[in-house]
Image: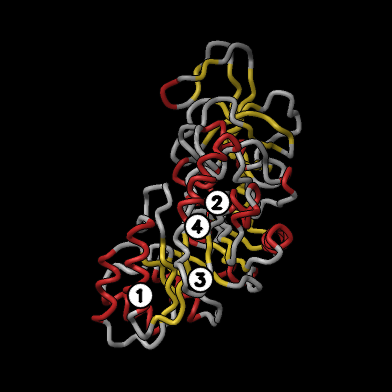
Amino acid sequence: MYRPTCAIIDRAALRHNFSVIRRHVRHARVIAVIKADAYGHGLLRCAQALSDADAFAVLELEAAVQLREAGFRQPILLLEGFFSIAELKVLAQYQLSTVIHHHEQLAMLPSCKEIEKLDVFLKINSGMNRLGFRPEQGRTALDTLRQQAFVSSITLMTHFACADDPQEKHDIDQQLNRFITLQPQGAERLPRTLANSAAILRYPQTHADWVRPGLLLYGASPLIEKTGDELGLRPVMTLTSQIIAIQHLNPQDRLGYGGQFVADRPMRIGIVAAGYADGYPRHAPTGTPVLVEGQRTRLIGRVSMDMLSVDLSGIEQARIGSPVTLWGEGLPVERVAESAGTISYELLAALSPRVRSVTRS
Ligand SMILES: *Cc1c(COP(=O)(O)O)cnc(C)c1O
């Protein structure tokens, strides 16, 4: 017996989305970003479906080690690098690649005697002001790296703040210009990586040597004006549940916590076994789209920890046990995110570990 709440993970969709990315970038190599448990989709099963990726990127050292131990031989990049000399030793042991984004990390390098070979991605802050050296500090950092005999490759890296919004093209140009000035004069050209999912689609001039798609892999759109299916992508995660109770409301009856929803007519309501402890957004308001028996209807009332309510008006065949889709196939996660005032990244990554998941190959 299982609680009916379930995330279906469609690995054929993942492979399809990967091939869409390949077609977009052509010459650049692809670093599949599978941080945060592959955006909530499950690290290892996604890595297996993405075994053609040229590299993987994660943030969590444990995840990187898990990938190595599972036999993946591609470069595995740690997007925030290492936080201590002890971690640096693990990096060396498992031949992981690392971002270096501040001086404290540079200063740790000489203290680690175990490193024979290290691939470094030098992160440049080109204007997002989150991680990275400012371009003028970047040159010094480069010199320091070049003095370490074990540093076997250096890739220049930056990250865009506004690639999702077509109105922000000027900001992209500014970031690009600041980044480009860093190519060291006289030295041989260093490989570069700039583009996340949104930049891959919108700005081919940023593809460079490596691209770093995350969200696109999972079939959601990083662009504010389009959904994943409009981009030829397929959703990898479908979050499903069932109706576990039916209520009949009379006019003026109130529903759920706070009694915020009040029926204005006789209504049939379905109670669905999914709530915010499963990762469904608590702030999703009445009107957020939901599918029942494949038919579109709406969430009503407040989302509780383990349950939510849906309007069954016009869905005569709905009964206890009827299938419910909260997002995924037939209902883009972007639509649910938009209604809940958030982004698809957050919904996918916040899927709760208590939700059973099944893999479709
Ligand atoms: C998460 C992340 C990505 C992937 O971003 P998407 O928008 O999901 O494509 C790329 N680069 C860095 C540095 C990241 O942290």
**Amino acid of disc 1:** Leu
What kind of residue is marked 3? Leu
Name the residue nearer the viewer: 252 or 342.
342
For the residues labelled 1 and 3, say whether their Cβ atoms are less than 8 Å apart: no
Location of mark 3 (residue): 190
Residue at figure coordinates x 25%, y 72% from the top left: 107
Instruction: Determine contact: label 4, label 1, CB under 8 Å.
Output: no
| Image height of 19 relative to 330, above or below | below
For disc 2, the neighbor class at 10 Å (few under 14, some 14 to 19, many from 20) is few
* Residue 26 percent location from the top left of the image: 71, 64
Task: Report helix, strand or loop for mark 4.
Answer: helix
**Within the image, what quadrant is residue 64 found in?**
bottom left
Disc 2 + disc 3, Cβ < 8 Å: no
Residue 122, above or below 224: below
Q: Earlier in the sequence, mark 2 or mark 1?
A: 2
Residue 283: where, in percent of width, then height?
A: 46, 32
- Of the two numbered discs 2 and 3 in the rendering, the one whose residue sits closer to the viewer: 3
What's the residue type where badge 2 is placed?
Answer: Arg
In depth, the one of 177 and 110 nearer the eye is: 177
Mark 4 or mark 1, earlier in chain? 1
> Regarding mark 1 in the picture, which secondary structure is present there?
helix
Question: Which residue is depicted at the point 75% across and 49% down?
Answer: 232
In the picture of the structure, the residue carrying the numbered disc 4 is 180
Which residue is labeled 1 in the image?
Answer: 145
Viewport quadrant of the C terminus: bottom right
Q: Which mark is residue 3?
A: 2
Question: Mark 2 or 1, which is nearer the eye?
Answer: 1
